[in-house]
Amino acid sequence: MDNQQIANLLNIQRASRENRLVIFVGAGVSMNSGVPSWNQLTNRMKAELPNEFSEETDALKIAQIYKDYRGHKEYMDKVKNILLYDKAVPNPLHKSILALNPCHIITTNYDDLIEQELSKDFLQYHIVRKDKDIPQMTYPNTLVKMHGDYITDNIVLTEDDYYNYKENFPLTRAFVQSLFASKLILFVGFSFADLNLKFILNELKNILSDKMQRPYLLSCDEPSYATKLYFVKKGINIVYFSEADVDLLNDGKYQSKDLSGIGLHTDKLLYAIKNYSAIPQDNLALYLYSRIVPYMSEMRSFGDGLQYFFPKMRLHWNAHSSGLQTFTDYFKQLAKDLATNE
């Protein structure tokens, strides 16, 4: 297994535990709820345009022409109808994303699937749908609908929308840029050819520097050398594990869910980020130490609550100011080994 990829995974995991992980959610996540892709959306629009546009491949141009021909209301109704507005429900990927405890979530999706999952899990995130929402932030965690929302009727899809983004969303743009400069960003649900990803990377080229934390792109497709080089020059690390490798990382503990193909592979990767430990759990002393040491200064205040750090392990102890008194055969044997220099 690639040691560099293991290091990438552990860096993301550490950011999750330290409350500095931002997850950037793309269209690929919603597609697992049956929501059509962007290409499917624009192809449906193109089918209703004059024949002269039948060979057009520019998605932004197609959306622009459709809106110009049909008017705003019919254009919005078409988008909502094709993208299953008010009909789709969250899929297991949404729950797996929230399980990583992102301090912020950014999405280019217009749907409300993330909001539905937040509500189901009773999580409080301030929803930013437009610039005026930013000064009203009431929670430390935010969900940023970077490309607008159906509710506010401000979705970013046409050529004009993209070209005028800086003027239409100046505060949202500045806030997202600040997150790239200060947090660890993980892209989930984006393909290498994703047009939104290219626009975002182009926006960030003057912000990201060698001194900043590089964003990560979670991929289910093995990148070619040329693709790796392209993203390295853009300042992005690609996180890729084959299906065999990710199953090895999860050590048979991943429970199969109602997903298949790329969605299933992505969910397994998210599970690995949440649960993988480079330290085998049979080395209990080192495993416990690695989990507890980031919170050493707060140790006394945790008391018996420390058990919640290890929900799947049946550990019992008495909490003392100087440490923990355990009742496991593992530590009894370890004490004997240490006493005899074994």
Image: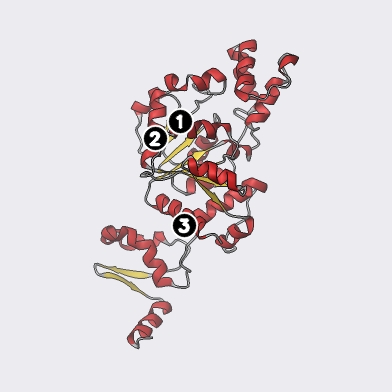
Q: Is residue 154 shown to the viewer in this render?
A: no
- The circle on residue 279 is none
* Measured Cα–Cα span from mark 1 to mark 2: 8 Å
Query: Which residue is outermost to the right?
Result: 51
Disc 3 secondary structure class: helix
In x, y percent, where is residue 20? 38, 46
Q: Quadrant of residue 255?
A: bottom right
Q: Nearer the viewer, mark 3 or mark 2?
A: 2
**Three-letter amino acid code of the residue under disc 3:** Ala
Is 325 left, or right, of 9 in this rendering?
left
In the rendered image, the quadrant that contains the C terminus is bottom left
Badge 1: residue crowd in 10 Å (few <14, some 14–19, many ≥20): some
Q: Are marks 1 and 3 in contact (CB under 8 Å)?
A: no
In x, y percent, where is residue 154? 50, 20
**Three-letter amino acid code of the residue under disc 1:** Glu
Is 65 left, or right, of 116 in this rendering?
right
> Is residue 137 depicted above or below 99 in this figure?
above
Mark 3 vs 2, N-terminal side: 3
* Measured Cα–Cα span from mark 1 to mark 3: 27 Å
What residue is disc 2 on?
207
> Is residue 90 depicted above or below 339 in this figure?
above
Tell which of 114 and 206 is nearer to you: 206
- The circle on residue 203 is 1
Badge 2: residue crowd in 10 Å (few <14, some 14–19, many ≥20): few
- The circle on residue 7 is 3
